[in-house]
Image: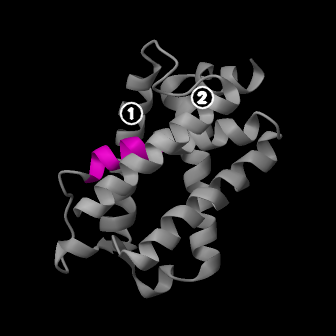
Amino acid sequence: MRIFGKVFVLGVTVGCELLAWLVTGQSVFLSGGLTWIGVLAGSALLGLVLELTLQYGLDAWRYVNAAGRQRLHGWTIPAWALFGVIMQDTFAVYAHWLPFAVAIPLTAWTQGFVFETTNQYRPMWRYHDRYRKAFVLAAGWIGLAIVFTFGLNTLVVGMGTIWSWVNG
């Protein structure tokens, strides 16, 4: 990942952390305790699974600086870990006021817009033709929102993370 991609992911993470803290009074890193370790580790693991199945298995995308070949970069898995934090915080903000069924698509739409728009102006990855269709990207972002919020909390961290922010 080029320097822009690293700064972008770190910047969005900090922004989402601050927004979640201001809206809900909690965030992944700022709330204390060890929850952040579970979120980062679980998100990194989910990111690795997505890389192996979608990038390598289905050939859905390639990173721009990969020079036409598939490979994991040193920053790829840490970026997925931070992506999990971004999705957790975004969902927590929406779910603070809205039901789950509304918060998930809003999380997907918001971060899909942020990441895909930025990727259009400063390419970090390229989708292969069959995955460039709008409905495929929309379904993919809904899937990412479900996996990195509900799935991550259910399977890796336990329901105590974002649900305590939403209901507390």
Q: Amino acid at mark 1?
A: Leu
Which one is closest to the eye, mark 1 or mark 2? 2
Name which of mark 1 and mark 2 comes first in the sequence. Answer: 2
The quarter of the picture where the C terminus appears is top right
Is residue 10 left or right of 69 when viewed as pictured?
A: right
Q: Is 61 rendered above or below residue 30?
A: below
Magenta stretch: give its range.
Answer: 76-84
Q: Is 158 rendered above or below residue 40?
A: above
Q: Quadrant of residue 64?
A: bottom left
Which color scheme is applied? one colour
Q: Is residue 145 magenta?
A: no
Q: Residue at x 64, y 30 (%)?
A: 22
Q: Is 110 rendered above or below residue 102?
A: below
Q: State whether residue 118 appears in this view.
A: yes
The quarter of the picture where the N terminus appears is bottom left
Q: Position of residue 77 (x, y in %)?
A: 29, 47
Q: Position of residue 83 (x, y in %)?
A: 44, 47
Is residue 166 left or right of 97 when viewed as pictured?
A: left
- Which residue carries the number 1 mark? 40
Magenta stretch secondary structure, dominant: helix
SS state under label 2:
helix
Q: Is 151 rendered above or below residue 112?
A: above
- Which residue carries the number 2 mark? 21
